[in-house]
Image (cartoon, rainbow, N blue to C red):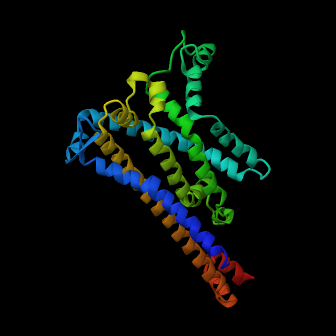
Amino acid sequence: MTQRRPFRTASIAVVWLWLGLFALLPNLGLLLVTFLERGESDFVSLVFTWDNYARLADPVFIRILGESLWLAAASTLVCLLIGYPFAYAVATARRGLRPWLLLLVVIPFWTNSLIRTYALIIILKSQGLASDVLLALGLINEPVSFMYGEFAVFTGLTYTLLPFMILPLYASIEKLDKRLLDAAKDLGASSLRAFWHVTLPLTLPGIVAGCMLVFLPSLGCFYIPEILGGAKSMLIGNFIKNQFLVARDWPLGAAASTILTVLLVLMIIGYWLSSRRVALRERKGADTGAATAGRTPDAAQADGNDGMTPGAHGARGRA
């Protein structure tokens, strides 16, 4: 144990050094840029100002932020509605089948997400697979294109980010103690009630983690709206990218990026609170079980007698 401590200390130090150099310092620098002015010859001018945050109150940016939040929330909700049943089915499947079901989730990661986004054009274009299926079913009379609109962007975000919802949900459901569900059913709870009062609260950290992994990338993703949405789609990710690479307005782009960082921090706090709530609930259940197990047989019999219904007491008296 003593020989491993230097290696452990060095490993932790390397991790902290990496996070400090490539995560903390860049974000601090980005935060500093938000309080500087845009330079004429350089990217920034060393003049303190609050105008960059005031410019974010522009109606154009508010509309872009609103559309981004709407699409991100819709994508997150659909990913949750699709991912939770699938993750539950994988977690409750027999052990020999689980690796193959998880493989279906991991396979999309073998291909670059940009290539997969371009592949969606084959499905969503006017002569694509979706249009052909609708024509074959008689639902439309002529080919229709689903490209270059909110629906195409929504489809792309949902398709790309669905695995990020399934994996944390599976991890949370898979470690769920099935004895709690059996106990709920023994107490007379239906399957729906047991899910609502037992399964759902205990898997809340997985839900929050999955929503965080889908919602925030949906806000910051810029290549999917550009490829599938075209010029009609301008989300906050595209706005930030244009400020840094097109308009060369680094302070305004940094201020918009800070808004996303604040949302990330809020969601991390929500994940921490949900995990703490579940841990307290499990600890309370464990303490209750330990207290119940520690009762004397006479006390348990007395409790059992006190808990009888009047009919049971009468039946016992007649016996």
Residue that lies at the very extreme toward the right in this rendered image: 96
Task: Tell whether 220 sits left or right of 107.
Answer: left
User: How many numbered discs sit on the rendered protein?
Assistant: 0
| Residue at 45% from the left image edge and 63% from the top image edge | 273
Could you say where residue 73 lies in the image, as x and y percent from the top left?
44, 41
Could you say where residue 149 lies in the image, as x and y percent from the top left?
44, 24
Q: Is residue 175 above or below residue 94?
A: below
| Residue at 62% from the left image edge and 45% from the top image edge | 85
Q: Is residue 177 above or below residue 149?
A: below
Which of the pair 303/37 is nearer the observer? 37
Which of the pair 4/257 is nearer the observer? 4
| Residue at 68% from the left image edge and 65% from the top image edge | 179
Could you say where residue 163 lies in the image, as x and y percent from the top left?
60, 43
Residue that lies at the very extreme toward the top in this rendered image: 142
Q: Is residue 314 above or below residue 83?
A: below
Task: Tell whether 55 sits left or right of 111.
Answer: left
Point out the image quarter for the C terminus.
bottom right
Which of the pair 142/302 is nearer the observer? 142
| Residue at 38% from the left image edge and 52% from the top image edge | 27
Could you say where residue 150 lies in the image, as x and y percent from the top left?
43, 27
Task: Tell whether 262 sits left or right of 142.
Answer: left
Point out the image quarter for the N terminus.
bottom right
Which of the pair 5/62 is nearer the observer? 5
Task: Tell whether 221 sits left or right of 176.
Answer: left
Q: Quadrant of residue 86?
A: top right
